[in-house]
Image: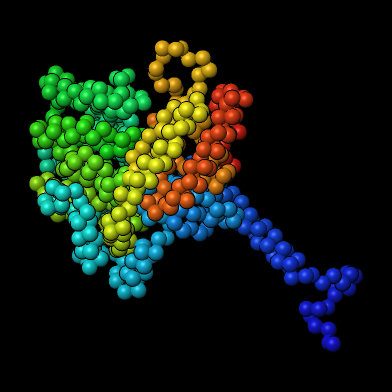
Amino acid sequence: MAVTESTATPVGQRPERARSGCEDERVRTRGDRDGARSVHAGTLRRRTVRESAARTYARALPIVPVRARGLTIEGADGRRYLDCLSGAGSLALGHNHPVVLEAIRKVLDSGAPMHVLDLDTPVKDAFTTELFRTLPPGLADRARVRFCGATGMDALEAAFQLVRLATGRTGMLAFTSTHHGITAGALDTSGGTRDGRVSLLPYPQDYRCPFGVGGERGAELAARWAEAVLGDTTSGVPLPAGMILEPVQDDGGVIPAPDGWLRRMRELTASRSIPLIADEAQTGVGRTGRLWAVEHSGVVPDVMVLSKAIGGSLPLAVLVYRDGLDTWQPGAHTGSHRGNQLAMAAGTATLAHVRENGLAERARTLGAHMLAQLHCLTERFSCVGDVRGRGLMIGIEMVTPDAHPPPDDTRPRPPAPSLATAVQRECLRRGLIVELGGSHAGVVRLLPPLTITDEQSDAVLDRLTDAVASVAATVVSRGPRSLMSERAEGHGRLPGG
């Protein structure tokens, strides 16, 4: 047989023993793993030296996603993760849902223009039709829609501009512990104001009630506070242009607004002709167990801020408001990218799929089950202070354990952001991606897609419980201060941050 290039043995080397098929496969597999690790490490290394110090998720989650479907993400290193971050709530149907991909492909294959400013298109008409079909009764029949830029913060700024223009007033009412975004107006209503244009009112909650009582009594006191501020001419708070609130405070630590309190805020604002703005950027599209979170209380706001899931995983922000506020002049609050055709198509498909398949009701049922399972953590581990949420929007607040609390001390223990960070790290090691929130970043948050199955939810609960147990065991053996000092020294950070 002639010696070919592939069979020749280089001079000075022994002929290699022929490998079996299994050995070849092992070599290829090992090579694939090594190559994947190289891609993973190289990407993280370049990210660290190229990107700004403002990066957030990349610091806590040193993964390089390359494929995703539903709840699952696969990293460049070959590891798979259950994603309970869901694009900060943007992925109502999870990653790459077939109905979303089909809607996007249909637009791409049609030859339709990708950029149309605010011109009318069949894609845009289909989106607004589906959106109006899902809006709370009482708003849909007298609503106007404003397409904003790509983010919820842009829609929020548009909302402020809208109510100020319509009322001729400038001040705003907002609530403590809230987070509406990072633009100037959003920061003002999130507690960052210094010029008096925004007045903050207490937001009712059970665990860290501003009045120390919680429950219905705490919600009643919060409502009375708001009424007193607006009813007292010496309060220093003039009649505002609007009131903005979150039906569930998301980044504030997953704090659902009591339904009765929310109705009181609606009555209070309606009686004084103050437009009520509901920020549904994260709570909308079925997340809390209703298509829109305000529907739990039966409240119809004057303005709704919509983004995240409204674009079906693509950038889209929409402002929906009562027609009587429509005092815009042509060209007001414009933006070049307010006509995202692919996002509108994906949003239409997402809204229709959620509505037609009862996914909001599914979120309510499964969310209640998950909350019930997680409530036992407060009994098992002293570092878990509270478990709360609504639908598939769940928060676990980590606190500093007190070995010898006074017997009559019912106050909540101090928040423990270091323990929450440790839980997030332990979750990632177990293949679970979770978010942090709360005023002190001490709340572990779950935002799984509405398509999560029963089996997947059980896996999420198992991994999360195991992660909390691991952190709690560390606290017992080494003390809570050890984790705090590790975080301060950088040892507790995830690699690649």
- Please indicate, yes or no, whether residue 202 appears anywhere in the rendered image: no
Q: Quadrant of residue 208?
A: top left
Viewer-proximal residue among 137 and 320: 137
> Is 249 left or right of 222, judged from the image as shown?
right
Is residue 153 positioned above or below 211 on the image? below
Viewer-proximal residue among 175 and 424: 424
Q: Quadrant for the C terminus, please.
A: top right
* Residue reaching furthest to the bottom: 1
Which residue is located at x 83 percent, y 84 percent?
A: 3
> Is 489 left or right of 269, judged from the image as shown?
right
> Is 487 left or right of 345, judged from the image as shown?
right
Which residue is located at x 40 percent, y 38 percent?
A: 371
Is residue 327 positioned above or below 272 on the image? below
The color scheme shown is rainbow
> Is 423 left or right of 174, judged from the image as shown?
right
Q: Quadrant of residue 438?
A: top left
Q: Position of residue 464 (x, y in %)?
A: 51, 40
Q: Quadrant for the N terminus, please.
A: bottom right
Q: Position of residue 418 (x, y in %)?
A: 51, 30
Q: Quadrant of residue 162?
A: top left
Q: Position of residue 446 (x, y in %)?
A: 42, 42
Q: Position of residue 495 (x, y in %)?
A: 59, 42
